[in-house]
Image (cartoon, rainbow, N blue to C red):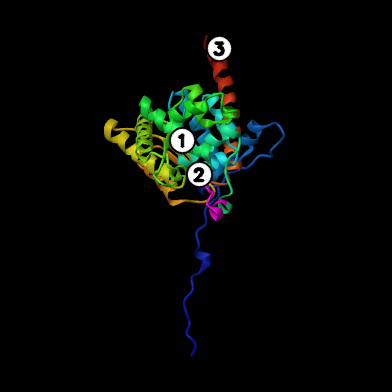
Amino acid sequence: MRAKFDTVDLKRVKTISLARRKSLASSKNLAGIPGSAGAEAFFDSLPKFLKAGDIQALIDSIIAARRKGKPVIIMAGGHVIKVGLNPILIDLMKQGLITGLCLNGAGLIHDSEIAMVGETSEDVAAGIGDGSFGMSAQTAKLFTTATQYASDQGLGLGQSAGIVLDDKANRYRRHSLLATCNRLGLPAMIHIAVDTDIVCQHPQYDAAAAARASHHDFKILAHQISRAEGGGVFINIGSAVILPEVFLKALTVSRNIYGKPHKIITANFDMINHYRPATNVVHRPTMHGGTGYNFVGHHELMIPLLAWGLKARYKRKSKSANKTAKKRS
C-alpha cells in the first residue's frame, strides 16, 4: 500500500501588497545610459548597487576627508607601478587628493628603476635560469645610497629614497612616486621584509640599516593614522601581505597611544580576494566604526576608473562650494 502524505492548502496563503513590501531594488537606483559627456555623466549613470555604489561612496569619502583636512594614504604593492599607474597617482598627489604613500620593498625597487632608466620589471624566469635575476647594479646601488642617507640623516627610508631619486641624474624622475612625494612634501613610507627583495642578494646590502630606516617609516605611518579620526582614508592596492600587516600594527599603536582612530574609511583593490587585505584593511580596522570597501578587478582598469570619477566629482563639488560661498558673501 502506497503511503499518503499531507500537503498544505495554498489557498490559505496570505498575500501582501507590493506597496507595503520592503524591496531592495528600486527604479530610483537603476542604471542610466552612459553618454559621451565624460566622467561626471558616467558616474552619475551608474546604478546605486553593490560595487557601483561602493566606489561612489569611496569617492565621496575621499573628497570629504580632504575637505576636513584628514589624510588619504595610498598603500601600494610593486605591481601597481609595473602596470604603469604612477602618472595617475602622481596627478592625484598634485591635486591634493592623496596626502601620503606607503610602498613595500618591491614598490621602492620598481619606482627607483622607473626614475633611473624609465623601465622596470625583468623576466624573472629567464633570470633565474642563468642566475642573473635581480642582479642589476644600479638598483642595488640606489637602495644602498638611500639606506645610507637615511642612516646619516635620521630619516625614514621613503623620504630618503625620494630625496635621492629627485635628482637630475635620474632622467625619468618625473614619473617617480617617491620623488614626487619629496617635491610636494608628502610623507612617503617604505615597509620592507628582510630577504624578500632583489637588493638583499647584493654584498653591499645592510639589513640592519635598511630595517632601522623602514621602522622609522612605521612610526611615521602610526602618527599619520592618529590624525584620521572622523573620516581619514586608507587604500591598499595590490599588497597581499606586507602592507596589510604593517597597517594593522600601526593602527594598533595609534589606538594604544592616542585612543584613536576608530571612525576611518578603508578600501582594498586587488585582482583576487586575499585573506589579509580583506581582514586587516577592510574588516578589522572598521569593526567599531567607519566603513571598509573591497574591490576586485585589474589595477590597470580599476585605479584609472577611481581617479577619473574622483577628479570629476571633486571638481563639481568644488564649483558648488564656491557658488555657495559667493552667495553667502
Determine whether the residue tagged by mark 3 lies in a helix, strand or loop: helix
Q: Around disc 2, counting alpha carbons within 10 Å, would you say few (fewer than 14), some (14 to 19), or many (20 or more)? A: many
Residue at image mark 2: 238
The residue at the far bottom in this view is: 1
Q: Nearer the viewer, mark 3 or mark 2?
A: 2
Q: Around disc 1, counting alpha carbons within 10 Å, would you say few (fewer than 14), some (14 to 19), or many (20 or more)? A: many
Magenta-highlighted residues: 127-133
Residue at image mark 3: 326
Horizontal and vertical percent for residue 77?
Answer: 49, 41
Q: Amino acid at mark 2?
A: Gly
Q: Amino acid at mark 3?
A: Lys
Can the viewer see residue 47 in this picture?
Answer: no
Q: Amino acid at mark 1?
A: Phe
Horizontal and vertical percent for residue 182?
Answer: 48, 24
**Count of labels shown?**
3
Residue at image mark 1: 143
Give me the residue at 51% from left, 22% from top.
Answer: 183
Answer with mark 2 or mark 1, whichever residue precedes in sequence: 1
Distance from Cα at disc 2 to Cα at disc 1: 22 Å
Can the viewer see residue 187 in this picture?
Answer: yes
Answer with mark 3 or mark 2, whichever residue precedes in sequence: 2
Q: Which mark is residue 286?
A: none
